[in-house]
C-alpha cells in the first residue's frame, strides 16, 4: 500500500514538473519556430505553433547582413570577456581576504558589502560619477559599474571559509605567499563555485542593456541586448527592410524580431552545458556551508 502511494506521488510529481517544463520551454520554442516561418503566414496564424509555416531563412539572412547586429555581438563579447575577467579577479581577491579570520576589520568590510545590497547607489549619482570620470560613452562605463556583485562575493567568501586550514598552513610552510595560495589552492578546490559565478556574471553581462542605454549614446557601442531592445520595443527596422516591398515590410519585420532574439540567446545556451555540471553543486556549496 505504501509503495503504491509513493509511486502515485512520484507519478503526479513528474507529471506536474513535465507540464511546468513545457509551459516554460514553449515560448522559446515558439520564438525559434516563428523565426523560420514566412511572415504573412505567421501573422495570419492563430493558436499553438508547432512547426515553421512555409519554412524560410529570410529573417536570418537579413539579420546576418545587418552591420548593427555584427557590431552588437562584438561589443557584447568584449563586455563579457573583459567584464567577467574583472569580476572574477576582484571577487576572488576580495573573497580570499574576507574569508581570512586574522584580517583586521573583516566584519566591518562585510557589513559595508551587505550595505550595498540594501541601499542602492541611485542612478543620478552614478551617472554624474561616470561623467566626471570621463567614462561616459565608453564601454568601460558599463564594465566598471558592475565590477563586483555582492551576492556573488558572499557566496565565494562562504565557500573559501570552508577550505581546510591545513592546506593553507602547508603552503605557508613551503614558503607560498597569499597570491600563490589563492591561485594554487583555493581556486582549484573551488571549481564548482568559480564556474557558477562565471555563469552568473556572463549572463548578467550579456543580457544587461539598461546601463548601456544610459551610458552609451553612440549606437556603434551598443551591446547586442540593447540592439535587440531597439528592434523589438522601439521597432527600428528600417536598416533590415531595404529592398522589401512596402506591403511585406510588416511581416518581414515580425520574423526578424524572432530571429534576432534567437541569435542573441544562443551564446548563453551554448555556454551553459559546459558549466552545468558545476552549476547546481556550486550554488549549494556556496549557500549551505557556513
Image (tube, rainbow, N blue to C red):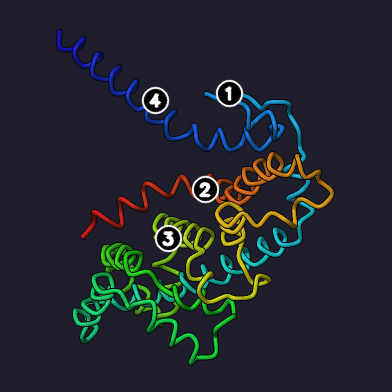
Q: CA distance from mark 1 to mark 3?
A: 36 Å
> In the displayed image of the protein, which residue is found farthest to the right?
243
- Mark 2 vs mark 4: give the one in front: 4
Q: Which residue is mark 3?
A: 197
- Dot 2: what SS? helix
Q: Which residue is mark 4?
A: 18
Q: Name the residue located 77 percent from the left edge and 48 percent from the top edge.
A: 62
Mark 4 vs 1: CB contact within 8 A: no
- Mark 3 vs mark 4: give the one in front: 4
- Mark 2 vs mark 1: give the one in front: 1
- Dot 1: what SS? loop
Name the spot of residue 187 as percent of width and height, x first: 43, 66
The quarter of the picture where the N terminus appears is top left
Q: CA distance from mark 4 to mark 1?
A: 18 Å
- Which image quadrant is residue 112 in? bottom left
- Dot 4: what SS? helix
Q: Which residue is mark 1?
A: 50
Amino acid at each position: 500500500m505504501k509503495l503504491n502511494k509513493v509511486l502515485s506521488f512520484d507519478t503526479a510529481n513528474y507529471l506536474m514538473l513535465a507540464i511546468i517544463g513545457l509551459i516554460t520551454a514553449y515560448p522559446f520554442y515558439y520564438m525559434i519556430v516563428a523565426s523560420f516561418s514566412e511572415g504573412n503566414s505567421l501573422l495570419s496564424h492563430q493558436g499553438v505553433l508547432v512547426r515553421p509555416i512555409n519554412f524560410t531563412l529570410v529573417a536570418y539572412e537579413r539579420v546576418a547582413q545587418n552591420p548593427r547586429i555584427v557590431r552588437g555581438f562584438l561589443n557584447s563579447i568584449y563586455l563579457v570577456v573583459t567584464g567577467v575577467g574583472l569580476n572574477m579577479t576582484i571577487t576572488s581577491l576580495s573573497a580570499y581576504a574576507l574569508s581570512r579570520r586574522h584580517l583586521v576589520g573583516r566584519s566591518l568590510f562585510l557589513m559595508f558589502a551587505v550595505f550595498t545590497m540594501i541601499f542602492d547607489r541611485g542612478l543620478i549619482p552614478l551617472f554624474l560619477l561616470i561623467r566626471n570620470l570621463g567614462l561616459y560613452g565608453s564601454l568601460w562605463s558599463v564594465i566598471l559599474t558592475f565590477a563586483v556583485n555582492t551576492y556573488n562575493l558572499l557566496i565565494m567568501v562562504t565557500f573559501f571559509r570552508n577550505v581546510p586550514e591545513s592546506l593553507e598552513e602547508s603552503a605557508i610552510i613551503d614558503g607560498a605567499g597569499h597570491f600563490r595560495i589563492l591561485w594554487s589552492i583555493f581556486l582549484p578546490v573551488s571549481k564548482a563555485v568559480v564556474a557558477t559565478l562565471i555563469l552568473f556574471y556572463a549572463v548578467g553581462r550579456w543580457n544587461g542593456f539598461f546601463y548601456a542605454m544610459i551610458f552609451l549614446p553612440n549606437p556603434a557601442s551598443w551591446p547586442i541586448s540593447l540592439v535587440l531592445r531597439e528592434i523589438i520595443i522601439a521597432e527600428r527596422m528600417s536598416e533590415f527592410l531595404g529592398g522589401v516591398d512596402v506591403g511585406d515590410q510588416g511581416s518581414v519585420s515580425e520574423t526578424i524580431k524572432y530571429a534576432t532574439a534567437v541569435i542573441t540567446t544562443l551564446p548563453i545556451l551554448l555556454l551553459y552545458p559546459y558549466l552545468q555540471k558545476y552549476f547546481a553543486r556550486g550554488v549549494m556549496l556556496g549557500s549551505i556551508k557556513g
